[in-house]
Amino acid sequence: MPFATNLHTHTYRCQHASGDASDYARHACAAGLAVLGMADHTPLPDGRWPDMRMAMDELDGYQAAVDRARAEYPQLRILMGLECEFAVEYESFYRDEILGRRGFDYLIAGCHYTPLDGGWIPSFGGLDSSRTLRAYADYTIRSMASELFAFVTHPDLIGCSNQEWTTNTAACARDICQAATALGVPLEINSYGLRKPWMNIPGGSRPAYPWLPFWETAQDMGTSVVLSSDAHRPVDVAAGYAEVAAIRDRYRLHEADLSYLTQPRTGAASR
Ligand SMILES: [Zn+2]
Ligand SMILES: [Zn+2]
């Protein structure tokens, strides 16, 4: 899809964002976007990780808010999505309930936690060893292989846990990018990291993500990308697009065509 698209946007329901679908739609129109995707953090049937997502009983209201925005801003193509953590126990919830019965347009894989030793560790800040990076790569690849997700958000969040690019981060990036190419799942260059506090590194600072060496690896592996603002405030609906587009261009990355998401779905298609 062209530049005038943002498929990663939140609402107040996740408890760390502001505004509702109509507020994002208004700002999207003002910014000249043609396609806006709402992708708030999914509720989970077992109530896991409740502090960063809507509750299950808010899902109907979320859908109603997206429908209301569609009615108020007919000039904008608005897609209804969710940002999801993959787990085998959620697979039928995502496939049958969300994409199936409720008819959502798409899901984003957001690997905010990484399974390790029978539990979960936080992916933001917890991936500072070869073992945890290995677990994160395996989990991200498993998420992509589920065929549930249109793309993977901020796969380069390993930049939050590692000051420097090492053989371990390189191996992790290579495995994720190689699998993304093989599975045909694009990876998202996410501008939210530019608006968060930057990392101190020897001799200066950098955004935790986007982390440039990761995208250089994507170039080597021929991985397709998606650009997004990951807006948590309506005013940020198109924030940082010039910067993430510059990363796409610097590494001559191919931007994935997700226009199929705007077409009516035909039965079994889950992506
Ligand atoms: Zn969020
Ligand atoms: Zn997000």
Image: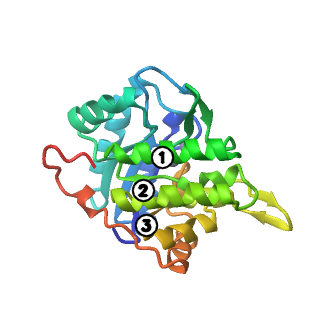
Tell me which residue sits at (86%, 68%) in the image: 203
Q: Secondary structure at mark 1?
A: helix
Could you tell which of marks 1 and 3 lies nearer the N-terminus?
Answer: 1
Image quarter of residue 216: bottom right
Q: Are marks 2 and 1 in contact (CB under 8 Å)?
A: yes
Report which residue position mark 1 lands on: 140
Front-most of 211 and 105?
A: 211
Type of the residue with mark 1: Thr
Q: Secondary structure at mark 2?
A: helix
Could you tell which of marks 2 and 3 lies nearer the N-terminus?
Answer: 2
* Mark 3 surroundings within 10 Å by alpha-carbon count, few (fewer than 14), some (14 through 19), many (20 or more): many
* Mark 2 surroundings within 10 Å by alpha-carbon count, few (fewer than 14), some (14 through 19), many (20 or more): many
Picture quarter with ligand 1: top right
Could you tell which of marks 2 and 1 lies nearer the N-terminus?
Answer: 1
Q: Are marks 1 and 3 in contact (CB under 8 Å)?
A: no
Camera-nearest label, 2 or 1: 2
Could you tell me if residue 209 is visible in this image? no
Type of the residue with mark 3: Thr
Asked if 239 appears above or below 111 in the picture, the reply is below
Report which residue position mark 3 lands on: 223
Residue 266 in the image: x percent, y percent? 13, 49
* Side of 87 relative to 97 (left or right): right
Residue 132 in the image: x percent, y percent? 63, 42
The mark tally for this picture is: 3
Report which residue position mark 2 lands on: 179
Q: Secondary structure at mark 3?
A: loop
Residue 161 in the image: x percent, y percent? 70, 49
Tell me which residue sits at (16%, 43%) in the image: 268
Asked if 80 appears above or below 235 in the picture, the reply is above
Q: CA distance from mark 1 to mark 3?
A: 15 Å
Tell me which residue sits at (33%, 37%) in the image: 63
Q: CA distance from mark 2 to mark 3?
A: 9 Å
